Image (cartoon, rainbow, N blue to C red):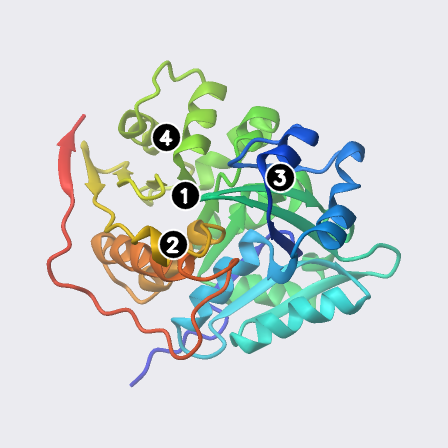
Amino acid sequence: MAQDLRGTLVGFCNPLLDISAVVDDGLLEQYNLKANDAILASPEHLPLFPTLISSYDAKFLPGGAGQNALRGAQLLLPADSAVFVGAVGADENAQRLKGAAEKAGLRTNYMVNEDKPTGTCALLITGPNRSMVANLSAAETYQFAHIAEPSNWKLIEQAKIFYITGFFFTVSPETIDAVAKHAQESGKTFTMNISAPFVPQFYKPAVEKTLPYVNVLFGNETEAAALANAFDFGTADIKAIAKRVADLPRAGTQPRVVVFTQGAESTVVATSDSDEVRVYPVAPVPSNEIGDTNGAGDAFVAAFLAQHILGQPIDLCVEAGHWLGAEVVRQIGPNYPEGELKFVASGSFAPAVEKL
């Protein structure tokens, strides 16, 4: 008998419509942007959005890191397994986001702000790099009162695993705190993504308050380095950082898993219940097959969470993450391949193991 996974995964993030374009380095310099980064838009960045639309071959894509990840997870799970929560405006862009979610079978529970437009994110592609500038707009108005409504809190009570991006620290730390504590008190799994270097850099108190509740933490190498710097770890070694984070105090007895991806390089996994750090190789994608790298990290999380929900061991979760990440970098933007997605384990995927 098939396992009933309805509503098992609930995620929170900022639903954004991505405006993606291949640009030159001059545009990055004009707006003082790094080639591979994620920031929140300041007033000086606002002219960038119409510039992309008027002067470049811009594409409109459904985005927001959390919704991207949950779309991918739902594609790999039985129907109605995942629910995404965030804030949008009462406009056409919100319908675009909802339509993309529905196409993947992802249920949405949006808080609708009648006074602000749906948020957007400028994606500036230069070669293999992507610079993200998010204008949150309606997304930043999300309030805990929305999910606290009894009809919505039922989603939290039904779920078994939660995924919240670090971006949400800028919007509703109250929601993060409430969901994290519910997960710990109910014996559920609470997962997070660092999401961007600015999160530990500027929101360290909130990150520090939440980390004891985190059972699975995702991040990439630059985010890991930013976390290590914010917490004064005194090391730039990714394996050592992963182990230090894994060993930070925990609110419950469930072990913590820390997963740091490094793009086309290896993925590092450390756990609180072992002195071993596992390093997983990444099979390279030929350069002539790469569309762009935007969304690869979200795809990794999507497949990892899907396999975790299905009860698979960490090795298979990571292998699935690598597989789906490679599929997404072959697309343009954070899109999943058309047709049925199905992960097939190789049977030979194994990490190098080091003791720290």
The alpha-carbon separation of the residues under discs 4 and 3 comes to 19 Å
Q: Which residue bears the numbered disc 4? A: 245
Amino acid type at mark 4: Val
Q: Secondary structure at mark 2?
A: helix
Asked if the residue at tag 1 contacts the one at tag 3, i.e. Cβ–Cβ closer than 8 Å, the answer is: no
Report the front residue among 180 and 135.
135
Amino acid type at mark 1: Phe
Task: Specify which label sits upstream in the sequence, 2 or 1.
Answer: 1
Task: Specify which label sits upstream in the sequence, 3 or 1.
Answer: 3
The alpha-carbon separation of the residues under discs 3 and 1 comes to 15 Å
Task: Specify which label sits upstream in the sequence, 4 or 2.
Answer: 4
* Mark 1 nearby-residue class (10 Å; few <14, some 14–19, many ≥20): many
Task: Specify which label sits upstream in the sequence, 4 or 3.
Answer: 3
Q: Which residue bears the numbered disc 1? A: 218
Q: Secondary structure at mark 4?
A: helix
Report the front residue among 343 and 20.
20
Q: Which residue bears the numbered disc 3? A: 169
Q: Secondary structure at mark 3?
A: helix
Q: Position of residue 287 (x, y in %)?
A: 34, 51
- Disc 4 or disc 2, which is closer to the eye? 2
Which quadrant of the figure has residue 168? Answer: top right
